[in-house]
Amino acid sequence: MWMAIIIGLCFFLAGQKPVGKGLVLSAIFSIVNFILIGQTLPLRLARSKRKTFFLSLGSIFFRYALMAIPIVVAVKFDQFDLVAAIVGLFMIQYVILADHFFKLIISFRNKEA
């Protein structure tokens, strides 16, 4: 989240307010999505296959609808940039992948030394 705020602030200072707003708005929704994943995961354990299936399906539909909100807002209002909103939705995934990538590089460097 801090990364989205800092990058969004940089866009604000550079005069690209719609880009900054789109990035921060969608990053917030992405974080809420990940929190919901963590909260609903224990609900699926120790239940019948039928209940687990419908709970999982409902969770997926709800989270997709939640993630569609910043995209719809960016399409309808000019004060939000659509591309930045899409990038912001995947901000957490980018950070997770970058973290694993840097850890992989460090582990290879430590093995070579």
Image: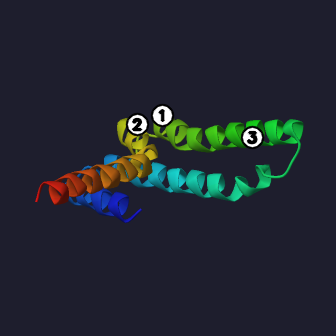
First in sequence: mark 3 or mark 1?
3
Residue positioned 18% across, 56% down in the render: 111
Q: Secondary structure at mark 1?
A: helix
Residue positioned 32% across, 57% down in the render: 8
First in sequence: mark 2 or mark 3?
3
Say what amino acid the circle numbered 3 marks: Ser
Q: Are marks 1 and 2 in contact (CB under 8 Å)?
A: yes
Instruction: Look at mark 3 in the image and give the residue it sits on.
Output: 56
Instruction: Look at mark 2 in the image and give the residue it sits on.
Output: 82
- Give how far across and how far down residue 67 sits, in percent: 57, 42
Between the C-alphas of marks 2 and 3, the distance is 29 Å
Question: Is residue 43 visible to us here?
Answer: yes
Q: Quadrant of the C terminus?
A: bottom left
Q: Residues within 10 Å of mark 3 (few under 14, many from 20)?
A: some
First in sequence: mark 1 or mark 2?
1
Q: Nearer the viewer, mark 2 or mark 3?
A: 3
Q: Secondary structure at mark 3?
A: helix
Q: Quadrant of the N terminus?
A: bottom left
Is residue 96 rendered to the left or right of residue 102?
right
Is residue 63 rendered to the left or right of residue 2?
right
- Give how far across and how far down residue 5 sits, in percent: 36, 62
> How many numbered discs sit on the rendered protein?
3
